[in-house]
Protein backbone atom coordinates (compact mmCIF):
# COMPACT_ATOMS: atom_id res chain seq x y z
CA UNK A 1 0.00 0.00 0.00
CA UNK A 2 1.31 3.44 -1.00
CA UNK A 3 0.00 6.77 0.22
CA UNK A 4 -0.07 10.22 -1.38
CA UNK A 5 -0.93 13.21 0.80
CA UNK A 6 -2.09 16.58 -0.52
CA UNK A 7 -1.46 18.93 2.38
CA UNK A 8 -2.83 21.53 2.26
CA UNK A 9 -5.59 21.62 -0.34
CA UNK A 10 -5.02 25.03 -1.90
CA UNK A 11 -7.23 27.85 -3.15
CA UNK A 12 -9.97 27.09 -0.63
CA UNK A 13 -11.08 29.02 2.46
CA UNK A 14 -9.62 27.11 5.40
CA UNK A 15 -7.34 24.14 5.93
CA UNK A 16 -7.72 20.57 4.68
CA UNK A 17 -5.66 17.71 3.38
CA UNK A 18 -6.35 14.66 1.23
CA UNK A 19 -4.85 11.19 1.64
CA UNK A 20 -4.82 8.95 -1.42
CA UNK A 21 -3.98 5.25 -1.02
CA UNK A 22 -2.57 3.23 -3.92
CA UNK A 23 -2.37 -0.53 -4.28
CA UNK A 24 0.75 -2.32 -5.48
CA UNK A 25 -0.28 -1.73 -9.12
CA UNK A 26 -0.43 2.04 -8.56
CA UNK A 27 -4.24 2.17 -8.69
CA UNK A 28 -6.23 4.24 -6.21
CA UNK A 29 -7.80 2.01 -3.59
CA UNK A 30 -9.10 4.60 -1.12
CA UNK A 31 -9.16 8.33 -0.35
CA UNK A 32 -9.86 10.50 2.69
CA UNK A 33 -10.72 14.20 2.81
CA UNK A 34 -9.61 15.62 6.18
CA UNK A 35 -10.58 19.00 7.61
CA UNK A 36 -7.74 19.74 9.97
CA UNK A 37 -8.94 22.71 12.04
CA UNK A 38 -11.35 23.07 14.93
CA UNK A 39 -13.98 25.83 14.99
CA UNK A 40 -15.30 25.46 18.52
CA UNK A 41 -17.78 28.34 18.33
CA UNK A 42 -20.64 26.22 19.63
CA UNK A 43 -18.81 25.60 22.88
CA UNK A 44 -17.13 28.88 23.71
CA UNK A 45 -20.29 30.91 23.10
CA UNK A 46 -22.06 29.12 25.95
CA UNK A 47 -22.96 31.65 28.63
CA UNK A 48 -22.90 34.64 26.29
CA UNK A 49 -26.07 36.77 25.86
CA UNK A 50 -27.99 35.61 22.81
CA UNK A 51 -27.94 39.09 21.26
CA UNK A 52 -24.14 38.90 21.02
CA UNK A 53 -24.28 35.80 18.84
CA UNK A 54 -24.47 37.55 15.44
CA UNK A 55 -21.30 39.54 16.10
CA UNK A 56 -19.48 36.55 17.62
CA UNK A 57 -20.38 33.98 14.99
CA UNK A 58 -19.60 36.39 12.15
CA UNK A 59 -15.96 35.91 13.19
CA UNK A 60 -16.13 32.32 12.02
CA UNK A 61 -15.26 33.52 8.54
CA UNK A 62 -13.71 36.57 6.91
CA UNK A 63 -15.19 35.67 3.52
CA UNK A 64 -18.84 35.13 4.45
CA UNK A 65 -19.44 36.94 7.77
CA UNK A 66 -22.71 38.37 6.44
CA UNK A 67 -24.11 34.86 6.07
CA UNK A 68 -23.45 34.07 9.71
CA UNK A 69 -24.81 37.44 10.78
CA UNK A 70 -28.08 36.73 9.01
CA UNK A 71 -28.53 33.12 10.13
CA UNK A 72 -27.64 34.09 13.70
CA UNK A 73 -29.95 37.11 13.71
CA UNK A 74 -32.82 34.98 12.40
CA UNK A 75 -32.25 32.54 15.27
CA UNK A 76 -32.31 35.50 17.67
CA UNK A 77 -35.54 36.78 16.03
CA UNK A 78 -37.07 33.42 16.91
CA UNK A 79 -35.87 33.66 20.52
CA UNK A 80 -37.46 37.11 20.77
CA UNK A 81 -40.54 35.86 18.85
CA UNK A 82 -40.52 38.94 16.62
CA UNK A 83 -40.53 39.65 12.90
CA UNK A 84 -38.31 42.48 11.63
CA UNK A 85 -40.14 45.39 9.96
CA UNK A 86 -40.57 45.00 6.18
CA UNK A 87 -37.80 47.50 5.44
CA UNK A 88 -35.49 45.62 7.80
CA UNK A 89 -36.16 42.39 5.89
CA UNK A 90 -35.50 44.07 2.53
CA UNK A 91 -32.22 45.52 3.81
CA UNK A 92 -31.13 42.15 5.15
CA UNK A 93 -31.86 40.67 1.73
CA UNK A 94 -29.94 43.47 0.05
CA UNK A 95 -26.76 42.93 2.03
CA UNK A 96 -27.20 39.19 1.52
CA UNK A 97 -27.26 39.64 -2.26
CA UNK A 98 -24.12 41.77 -2.05
CA UNK A 99 -22.49 38.96 -0.07
CA UNK A 100 -23.37 36.49 -2.83
CA UNK A 101 -21.91 38.76 -5.50
CA UNK A 102 -18.58 39.26 -3.77
CA UNK A 103 -18.27 35.64 -2.62
CA UNK A 104 -19.15 34.08 -5.99
CA UNK A 105 -16.75 36.47 -7.72
CA UNK A 106 -13.97 35.43 -5.34
CA UNK A 107 -14.65 31.73 -5.88
CA UNK A 108 -14.83 31.83 -9.65
CA UNK A 109 -12.21 34.41 -10.60
CA UNK A 110 -9.61 34.04 -7.86
CA UNK A 111 -9.85 30.39 -6.79
CA UNK A 112 -11.09 28.38 -9.79
CA UNK A 113 -10.43 30.47 -12.90
CA UNK A 114 -6.67 29.68 -12.90
CA UNK A 115 -7.58 26.02 -13.57
CA UNK A 116 -10.34 26.83 -16.03
CA UNK A 117 -8.49 29.45 -18.07
CA UNK A 118 -4.85 28.39 -17.72
CA UNK A 119 -5.46 24.64 -17.63
CA UNK A 120 -5.34 21.93 -14.98
CA UNK A 121 -1.93 20.82 -16.26
CA UNK A 122 -0.42 24.28 -16.56
CA UNK A 123 2.68 25.32 -14.65
CA UNK A 124 1.69 25.47 -10.95
CA UNK A 125 3.99 28.45 -10.51
CA UNK A 126 1.70 30.41 -12.84
CA UNK A 127 -1.61 28.67 -12.09
CA UNK A 128 -2.84 31.33 -9.70
CA UNK A 129 -4.38 34.79 -9.73
CA UNK A 130 -1.09 36.33 -10.85
CA UNK A 131 -0.85 33.99 -13.81
CA UNK A 132 -4.46 34.83 -14.63
CA UNK A 133 -3.64 38.55 -14.58
CA UNK A 134 -0.78 37.93 -16.98
CA UNK A 135 -2.72 35.61 -19.31
CA UNK A 136 -6.14 37.28 -19.27
CA UNK A 137 -5.99 40.71 -17.62
CA UNK A 138 -9.54 41.60 -18.72
CA UNK A 139 -10.97 38.57 -16.92
CA UNK A 140 -8.86 39.28 -13.84
CA UNK A 141 -10.06 42.90 -13.75
CA UNK A 142 -13.67 41.73 -14.05
CA UNK A 143 -13.21 39.52 -11.02
CA UNK A 144 -11.72 42.33 -8.98
CA UNK A 145 -14.43 44.76 -10.06
CA UNK A 146 -17.33 42.42 -9.24
CA UNK A 147 -15.97 41.50 -5.85
CA UNK A 148 -15.27 45.17 -5.13
CA UNK A 149 -18.83 46.10 -6.11
CA UNK A 150 -20.30 43.56 -3.68
CA UNK A 151 -17.99 44.70 -0.90
CA UNK A 152 -18.81 48.36 -1.53
CA UNK A 153 -22.53 47.63 -1.16
CA UNK A 154 -21.83 45.94 2.18
CA UNK A 155 -19.74 48.92 3.25
CA UNK A 156 -22.38 51.41 2.11
CA UNK A 157 -25.08 49.66 4.12
CA UNK A 158 -23.14 48.64 7.19
CA UNK A 159 -20.23 51.14 7.23
CA UNK A 160 -17.87 48.14 7.39
CA UNK A 161 -16.81 45.62 4.74
CA UNK A 162 -15.84 42.74 7.05
CA UNK A 163 -17.68 41.62 10.20
CA UNK A 164 -20.24 44.45 10.05
CA UNK A 165 -22.38 45.03 13.14
CA UNK A 166 -25.31 46.42 11.15
CA UNK A 167 -27.36 43.20 11.04
CA UNK A 168 -28.82 42.69 14.52
CA UNK A 169 -31.56 40.69 16.23
CA UNK A 170 -34.86 42.20 15.16
CA UNK A 171 -33.64 43.66 11.85
CA UNK A 172 -30.82 46.10 11.12
CA UNK A 173 -29.56 49.01 13.19
CA UNK A 174 -29.81 51.84 10.63
CA UNK A 175 -31.97 52.61 7.57
CA UNK A 176 -30.72 52.92 4.02
CA UNK A 177 -29.60 56.42 3.03
CA UNK A 178 -30.97 57.60 -0.35
CA UNK A 179 -27.50 58.57 -1.54
CA UNK A 180 -26.24 55.04 -0.84
CA UNK A 181 -29.15 53.58 -2.81
CA UNK A 182 -28.40 55.89 -5.73
CA UNK A 183 -24.71 55.03 -5.65
CA UNK A 184 -25.45 51.30 -5.79
CA UNK A 185 -27.93 51.76 -8.64
CA UNK A 186 -25.34 53.78 -10.58
CA UNK A 187 -22.85 50.90 -10.35
CA UNK A 188 -25.25 48.12 -11.30
CA UNK A 189 -25.18 48.43 -15.13
CA UNK A 190 -21.41 47.99 -15.31
CA UNK A 191 -21.50 45.07 -12.88
CA UNK A 192 -24.20 43.32 -14.89
CA UNK A 193 -22.21 43.74 -18.10
CA UNK A 194 -19.21 42.08 -16.46
CA UNK A 195 -21.30 39.21 -15.07
CA UNK A 196 -23.05 38.56 -18.40
CA UNK A 197 -19.78 38.78 -20.33
CA UNK A 198 -18.09 36.32 -17.98
CA UNK A 199 -20.94 33.83 -18.19
CA UNK A 200 -20.96 34.07 -22.00
CA UNK A 201 -17.21 33.47 -22.09
CA UNK A 202 -17.43 30.52 -19.69
CA UNK A 203 -19.97 28.79 -21.92
CA UNK A 204 -17.48 28.97 -24.82
CA UNK A 205 -14.81 27.03 -22.88
CA UNK A 206 -17.03 24.30 -21.39
CA UNK A 207 -16.30 21.88 -24.22
CA UNK A 208 -12.62 21.85 -23.26
CA UNK A 209 -13.44 19.98 -20.07
CA UNK A 210 -15.47 17.00 -21.24
CA UNK A 211 -13.39 14.50 -19.28
CA UNK A 212 -13.51 16.56 -16.10
CA UNK A 213 -17.26 17.14 -16.42
CA UNK A 214 -17.79 13.38 -16.74
CA UNK A 215 -15.66 12.54 -13.69
CA UNK A 216 -15.88 15.46 -11.26
CA UNK A 217 -18.32 14.19 -8.68
CA UNK A 218 -20.99 12.75 -10.98
CA UNK A 219 -22.28 10.10 -8.60
CA UNK A 220 -26.04 10.75 -8.27
CA UNK A 221 -27.06 12.33 -4.97
CA UNK A 222 -29.95 14.26 -3.53
CA UNK A 223 -29.91 18.05 -3.66
CA UNK A 224 -31.19 20.48 -1.04
CA UNK A 225 -32.07 24.16 -1.28
CA UNK A 226 -34.52 26.81 -0.15
CA UNK A 227 -37.47 27.89 -2.30
CA UNK A 228 -40.64 29.93 -1.84
CA UNK A 229 -44.22 28.70 -2.34
CA UNK A 230 -43.87 29.21 -6.11
CA UNK A 231 -40.71 27.06 -6.06
CA UNK A 232 -38.53 30.06 -6.90
CA UNK A 233 -34.98 30.28 -5.60
CA UNK A 234 -34.79 31.91 -2.18
CA UNK A 235 -31.58 32.85 -0.40
CA UNK A 236 -32.95 34.59 2.68
CA UNK A 237 -36.45 33.46 3.62
CA UNK A 238 -37.60 30.22 2.02
CA UNK A 239 -38.42 26.67 3.04
CA UNK A 240 -36.01 23.77 2.58
CA UNK A 241 -36.65 21.18 -0.13
CA UNK A 242 -34.86 17.92 -0.94
CA UNK A 243 -34.92 16.43 -4.43
CA UNK A 244 -33.53 13.06 -5.41
CA UNK A 245 -31.10 12.48 -8.27
CA UNK A 246 -33.97 12.07 -10.75
CA UNK A 247 -35.54 15.37 -9.74
CA UNK A 248 -38.40 13.98 -7.64
CA UNK A 249 -39.20 15.88 -4.44
CA UNK A 250 -38.54 13.69 -1.40
CA UNK A 251 -39.17 16.33 1.30
CA UNK A 252 -40.51 19.86 1.05
CA UNK A 253 -41.77 22.87 3.01
CA UNK A 254 -39.26 22.25 5.80
CA UNK A 255 -39.23 25.15 8.26
CA UNK A 256 -36.02 26.08 10.03
CA UNK A 257 -37.43 24.86 13.35
CA UNK A 258 -38.00 21.39 11.84
CA UNK A 259 -34.57 20.84 10.25
CA UNK A 260 -33.54 18.17 12.80
CA UNK A 261 -36.35 15.88 11.62
CA UNK A 262 -34.61 15.62 8.26
CA UNK A 263 -30.92 16.33 8.86
CA UNK A 264 -28.70 14.20 11.07
CA UNK A 265 -25.00 14.73 11.79
CA UNK A 266 -22.38 12.01 11.91
CA UNK A 267 -18.93 12.43 13.45
CA UNK A 268 -16.01 11.16 11.38
CA UNK A 269 -12.86 9.65 12.86
CA UNK A 270 -10.55 11.32 10.36
CA UNK A 271 -11.96 14.86 10.16
CA UNK A 272 -13.06 17.67 12.48
CA UNK A 273 -15.90 18.43 10.07
CA UNK A 274 -19.11 16.55 10.82
CA UNK A 275 -21.05 14.83 8.05
CA UNK A 276 -24.73 15.81 7.85
CA UNK A 277 -27.03 13.32 6.11
CA UNK A 278 -30.70 13.04 5.12
CA UNK A 279 -32.25 11.24 8.07
CA UNK A 280 -34.94 9.27 6.23
CA UNK A 281 -32.17 7.58 4.20
CA UNK A 282 -29.81 7.16 7.16
CA UNK A 283 -26.03 7.41 7.34
CA UNK A 284 -24.07 7.13 5.09
CA UNK A 285 -26.69 6.57 2.37
CA UNK A 286 -28.37 9.95 2.87
CA UNK A 287 -25.85 11.95 0.85
CA UNK A 288 -27.00 15.27 -0.53
CA UNK A 289 -25.43 18.38 -2.00
CA UNK A 290 -26.10 22.05 -1.26
CA UNK A 291 -24.88 25.28 -2.84
CA UNK A 292 -25.32 26.85 -6.30
CA UNK A 293 -25.65 23.58 -8.22
CA UNK A 294 -28.10 22.09 -5.73
CA UNK A 295 -30.17 25.27 -5.57
CA UNK A 296 -30.60 25.40 -9.34
CA UNK A 297 -31.52 21.71 -9.36
CA UNK A 298 -34.12 22.21 -6.63
CA UNK A 299 -35.72 25.50 -7.75
CA UNK A 300 -38.12 25.73 -10.66
CA UNK A 301 -36.91 29.27 -11.44
CA UNK A 302 -34.73 32.03 -10.01
CA UNK A 303 -37.44 34.67 -10.20
CA UNK A 304 -35.38 37.16 -12.20
CA UNK A 305 -35.59 37.31 -16.02
CA UNK A 306 -32.00 37.17 -17.23
CA UNK A 307 -30.97 34.52 -14.73
CA UNK A 308 -34.05 32.48 -15.69
CA UNK A 309 -33.04 32.58 -19.36
CA UNK A 310 -29.59 31.37 -18.38
CA UNK A 311 -31.12 28.67 -16.17
CA UNK A 312 -33.13 27.37 -19.12
CA UNK A 313 -29.95 27.09 -21.18
CA UNK A 314 -28.13 25.51 -18.23
CA UNK A 315 -30.74 22.75 -18.16
CA UNK A 316 -30.50 22.24 -21.90
CA UNK A 317 -26.73 21.82 -21.62
CA UNK A 318 -26.48 19.91 -18.35
CA UNK A 319 -29.78 18.08 -17.99
CA UNK A 320 -32.92 18.64 -15.94
CA UNK A 321 -30.87 17.62 -12.88
CA UNK A 322 -27.20 18.44 -13.38
CA UNK A 323 -25.12 15.76 -11.63
CA UNK A 324 -21.53 16.79 -12.31
CA UNK A 325 -20.01 18.85 -9.52
CA UNK A 326 -17.93 20.54 -12.21
CA UNK A 327 -21.11 22.52 -12.95
CA UNK A 328 -20.95 24.29 -9.60
CA UNK A 329 -18.92 26.88 -11.53
CA UNK A 330 -21.63 27.37 -14.14
CA UNK A 331 -24.36 27.59 -11.50
CA UNK A 332 -22.30 30.06 -9.48
CA UNK A 333 -22.11 32.47 -12.41
CA UNK A 334 -25.87 32.26 -12.99
CA UNK A 335 -26.42 33.04 -9.32
CA UNK A 336 -24.01 35.96 -9.48
CA UNK A 337 -26.15 37.44 -12.25
CA UNK A 338 -29.32 36.70 -10.28
CA UNK A 339 -27.86 38.51 -7.26
CA UNK A 340 -27.30 41.66 -9.30
CA UNK A 341 -30.83 41.50 -10.69
CA UNK A 342 -32.25 41.01 -7.20
CA UNK A 343 -30.30 44.01 -5.89
CA UNK A 344 -31.90 46.17 -8.57
CA UNK A 345 -35.40 44.88 -7.73
CA UNK A 346 -34.94 45.55 -4.01
CA UNK A 347 -33.64 49.07 -4.57
CA UNK A 348 -36.51 49.86 -6.94
CA UNK A 349 -38.98 49.45 -4.06
CA UNK A 350 -39.51 52.85 -2.34
CA UNK A 351 -40.35 51.01 0.90
CA UNK A 352 -36.69 50.07 1.29
CA UNK A 353 -36.01 53.64 2.49
CA UNK A 354 -38.47 53.32 5.39
CA UNK A 355 -36.79 54.26 8.67
CA UNK A 356 -38.53 51.51 10.69
CA UNK A 357 -35.92 48.79 10.39
CA UNK A 358 -35.73 47.01 13.75
CA UNK A 359 -38.09 45.27 16.19
CA UNK A 360 -37.19 45.19 19.89
CA UNK A 361 -37.98 42.49 22.43
CA UNK A 362 -36.37 40.33 25.08
CA UNK A 363 -36.49 36.57 25.57
CA UNK A 364 -39.89 35.14 24.67
CA UNK A 365 -38.79 31.66 23.57
CA UNK A 366 -36.01 29.52 24.97
CA UNK A 367 -35.00 28.17 21.56
CA UNK A 368 -34.50 29.62 18.12
CA UNK A 369 -33.32 28.40 14.71
CA UNK A 370 -32.17 30.57 11.82
CA UNK A 371 -31.77 29.13 8.33
CA UNK A 372 -30.57 30.88 5.17
CA UNK A 373 -28.76 30.05 1.97
CA UNK A 374 -25.13 31.12 2.28
CA UNK A 375 -23.18 31.37 -1.00
CA UNK A 376 -21.92 27.83 -0.41
CA UNK A 377 -25.28 26.38 0.64
CA UNK A 378 -27.72 25.98 3.50
CA UNK A 379 -26.55 27.52 6.77
CA UNK A 380 -28.30 26.72 10.06
CA UNK A 381 -27.83 28.36 13.47
CA UNK A 382 -29.68 26.70 16.36
CA UNK A 383 -29.56 28.20 19.87
CA UNK A 384 -31.03 27.33 23.26
CA UNK A 385 -31.05 29.96 26.02
CA UNK A 386 -31.98 30.27 29.70
CA UNK A 387 -34.61 32.67 31.06
CA UNK A 388 -32.02 35.47 31.16
CA UNK A 389 -31.09 34.94 27.51
CA UNK A 390 -27.69 33.31 28.05
CA UNK A 391 -26.71 30.66 25.53
CA UNK A 392 -27.01 27.17 27.02
CA UNK A 393 -26.34 25.27 23.79
CA UNK A 394 -25.58 26.09 20.19
CA UNK A 395 -25.29 24.08 17.00
CA UNK A 396 -24.13 25.40 13.65
CA UNK A 397 -24.42 23.39 10.44
CA UNK A 398 -22.41 25.11 7.72
CA UNK A 399 -22.73 24.55 3.99
CA UNK A 400 -19.45 22.69 3.68
CA UNK A 401 -20.66 20.29 6.35
CA UNK A 402 -23.74 19.44 4.29
CA UNK A 403 -21.42 18.74 1.35
CA UNK A 404 -18.88 16.73 3.34
CA UNK A 405 -20.01 13.26 2.25
CA UNK A 406 -20.42 14.38 -1.35
CA UNK A 407 -16.96 15.98 -1.38
CA UNK A 408 -15.44 12.74 -0.10
CA UNK A 409 -17.13 10.76 -2.85
CA UNK A 410 -16.10 13.29 -5.47
CA UNK A 411 -12.46 13.16 -4.33
CA UNK A 412 -12.52 9.38 -4.61
CA UNK A 413 -14.01 9.47 -8.11
CA UNK A 414 -11.52 12.02 -9.43
CA UNK A 415 -8.57 10.22 -7.85
CA UNK A 416 -9.56 6.85 -9.28
CA UNK A 417 -10.03 8.25 -12.76
CA UNK A 418 -7.06 10.58 -13.09
CA UNK A 419 -4.26 9.27 -10.84
CA UNK A 420 -1.74 6.79 -12.12
CA UNK A 421 0.63 6.01 -9.30
CA UNK A 422 3.24 4.59 -11.66
CA UNK A 423 3.43 7.75 -13.78
CA UNK A 424 2.73 10.55 -11.33
CA UNK A 425 2.12 14.04 -12.70
CA UNK A 426 1.28 17.18 -10.78
CA UNK A 427 -1.82 17.83 -12.90
CA UNK A 428 -3.36 14.59 -11.64
CA UNK A 429 -3.18 15.84 -8.07
CA UNK A 430 -4.38 19.28 -9.07
CA UNK A 431 -7.61 17.75 -10.38
CA UNK A 432 -8.20 16.13 -7.01
CA UNK A 433 -7.83 19.53 -5.34
CA UNK A 434 -9.93 21.13 -8.08
CA UNK A 435 -12.98 19.01 -7.40
CA UNK A 436 -12.86 20.25 -3.82
CA UNK A 437 -12.59 23.83 -5.10
CA UNK A 438 -15.68 23.27 -7.26
CA UNK A 439 -17.72 23.05 -4.06
CA UNK A 440 -16.03 26.28 -2.86
CA UNK A 441 -15.71 24.91 0.68
CA UNK A 442 -15.32 27.28 3.61
CA UNK A 443 -13.49 25.15 6.12
CA UNK A 444 -14.01 27.51 9.07
CA UNK A 445 -12.13 30.82 9.04
CA UNK A 446 -10.94 32.11 5.71
CA UNK A 447 -7.57 31.29 4.22
CA UNK A 448 -6.06 33.92 1.99
CA UNK A 449 -3.91 32.17 -0.59
CA UNK A 450 -2.31 33.35 -3.81
CA UNK A 451 -3.27 30.13 -5.56
CA UNK A 452 0.15 28.47 -5.74
CA UNK A 453 0.22 24.73 -5.23
CA UNK A 454 1.66 24.96 -1.71
CA UNK A 455 1.91 21.26 -1.05
CA UNK A 456 4.33 18.40 -0.83
CA UNK A 457 3.46 15.06 -2.44
CA UNK A 458 5.11 12.10 -0.75
CA UNK A 459 4.96 8.59 -2.21
CA UNK A 460 5.73 5.83 0.32
CA UNK A 461 6.20 2.12 -0.18
CA UNK A 462 4.50 -0.64 1.84
CA UNK A 463 7.27 -0.44 4.46
CA UNK A 464 6.83 3.33 4.90
CA UNK A 465 10.01 4.22 3.04
CA UNK A 466 9.85 7.39 0.91
CA UNK A 467 9.95 6.41 -2.76
CA UNK A 468 9.44 9.82 -4.28
CA UNK A 469 8.79 13.41 -3.19
CA UNK A 470 7.45 16.34 -5.21
CA UNK A 471 7.70 19.90 -3.92
CA UNK A 472 6.40 23.06 -5.65
Image: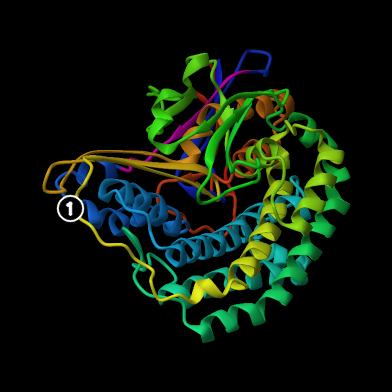
Q: How crowded is mark 1: few (under 14 residues within 10 Å), some or many (20 or more)?
A: some
Q: Mark 1 points at which residue?
A: 49
Q: Which residue lies furthest to the left in this view?
A: 388
Check the image and report above or below for 355 versus 408: below
The residue closer to the viewer here, 187 or 197, is 187
Q: Residue 159 location, x and y as percent?
A: 41, 77
Check the image and report above or below for 345 versus 256: below
Residue 418 shown left or right of residue 402 in the figure: right
Residue 255 makes an appearance in the image: yes
Q: Residue 279 location, x and y as percent?
A: 47, 19
Q: Any magenta on residue 74?
A: no
Residue 288 picture quarter: top right
Q: Residue 10 location, x and y as percent?
A: 55, 48
Assign a secondary structure to mark 1. loop
| Magenta region | 29-39
The residue closer to the viewer here, 186 or 197, is 186
Residue 331 shown left or right of residue 376 in the figure: right
The residue closer to the viewer here, 362 or 38, is 362
Residue 325 shown left or right of residue 357 in the figure: right
Identity of the residue drawn at 82% across and 33% down: 319
For the N terminus, the quadrant is top right
Residue 463 makes an appearance in the image: no
Q: Which color scheme did the rendering employ for the protein?
A: rainbow
Name the magenta segment's main secondary structure. strand
Check the image and report above or below for 62 versus 181: above
Amino acid sequence: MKKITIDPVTRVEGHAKIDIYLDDQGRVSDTHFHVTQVRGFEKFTEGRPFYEMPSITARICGICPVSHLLASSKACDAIMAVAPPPAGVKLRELIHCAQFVQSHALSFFHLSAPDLLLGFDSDPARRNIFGLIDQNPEMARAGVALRKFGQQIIEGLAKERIHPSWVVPGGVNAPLAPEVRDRILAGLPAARVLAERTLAFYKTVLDRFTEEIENFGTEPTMHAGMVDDARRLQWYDGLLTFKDAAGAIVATDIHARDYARFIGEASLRDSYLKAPYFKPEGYPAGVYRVGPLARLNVAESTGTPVADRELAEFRQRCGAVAQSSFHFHYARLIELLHGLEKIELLLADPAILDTHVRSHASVNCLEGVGMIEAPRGVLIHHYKVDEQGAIRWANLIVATGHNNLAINRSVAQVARHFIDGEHMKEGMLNRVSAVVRAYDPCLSCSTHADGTLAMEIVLRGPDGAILDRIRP
